[in-house]
Amino acid sequence: MALHDATREDRYSLNEETHNLQPQSSGSKSSCVRAAGIGCLALIIVAFLSGLWIARLVTKNPVMHKVWTESQRIAQCQLQLQEIGGALDRYNSRNGKYPASLDELYPVFLEKKETLHCPSAPGPKDTMSYEYTPPDANTPADAAVAVCNLHVIIEGQPPLTITLLKNGTVVRKTPKIHGSPTAPK
């Protein structure tokens, strides 16, 4: 019984006025912090192991590697189309019209000619691969100016379409995947 009372006294203090035992704040906080620390450590370990598993999956699985690589190319293509949009605006500001061809943007309005070549396009990097439709003053702001249809994520499926609008916005349209299961009627 004495051991039990000593343990109670370690964790509780006697309130002189009410003669009741009250929990000590320092002992209970340290045990809570210790428990939370162990929980956080376990969470960090699980997140680290999950990251390793995903990295292994992406690097070792050829399908996942292709999807990862193509997603990087898509991001690069979107950045290039944004850069082309800025170059088109600068060209229009200086000349009062849009160029007849995207090739006219280099070297004055674009630093690198490779910007006109999509990362997924075959062929030399110094050739233009985007489909360009020169806008005029009456063309609406949401009309397509440059289009890229070269990003195939899954073999046998239609490509992803990335479009530069006249207002400078880059829009990505994901195709409908053929052969996917349909909901029962």
Image (spheres, rainbow, N blue to C red):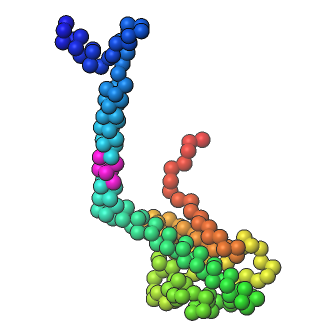
Quadrant location of the N terminus in the rendered image: top left
Q: Is residue 143 left or right of residue 182?
A: right
Between 7 and 53, the one lying in front of the other is 7
Which segment did they paint magenta? 45-51
Q: Residue at x 50, y 53 (%)?
A: 180
Farthest residue toward the front?
16
Q: Can you give x and y, in whole percent of width and height, for residue 20 in the image?
A: 38, 9
Q: Is residue 69 left or right of residue 3?
A: right
Q: Is residue 61 visible?
A: no
Q: Can you give x and y, in whole percent of width and height, for residue 101 in the image?
A: 64, 89
Vertical placement of residue 142 versus 123, above or below: above
Between 105 and 42, the one lying in front of the other is 42
Quadrant location of the C terminus in the rendered image: top right
Residue 89 part of the magenta segment: no
Between 99 and 131, the one lying in front of the other is 99
Vertical placement of residue 6 versus 69, above or below: above
Residue 49 part of the magenta segment: yes
Q: Is residue 168 left or right of residue 43?
A: right
Q: Can you give x and y, in whole percent of width and height, for residue 54 in the image?
A: 34, 55
Residue 142's quadrant in the figure? bottom right
Q: Can you give x and y, in whole percent of width and height, for residue 10 in the image?
A: 26, 19
Q: Is residue 92 visible?
A: yes
| Predominant secondary structure, magenta span | helix
Q: Residue at x 34, y 61 (%)?
A: 58
Q: Residue at x 62, y 70 (%)?
A: 170
Q: Residue at x 49, y 90 (%)?
A: 126
Vertical placement of residue 140 versus 40, above or below: below
| Numbered circles on residues, count | 0
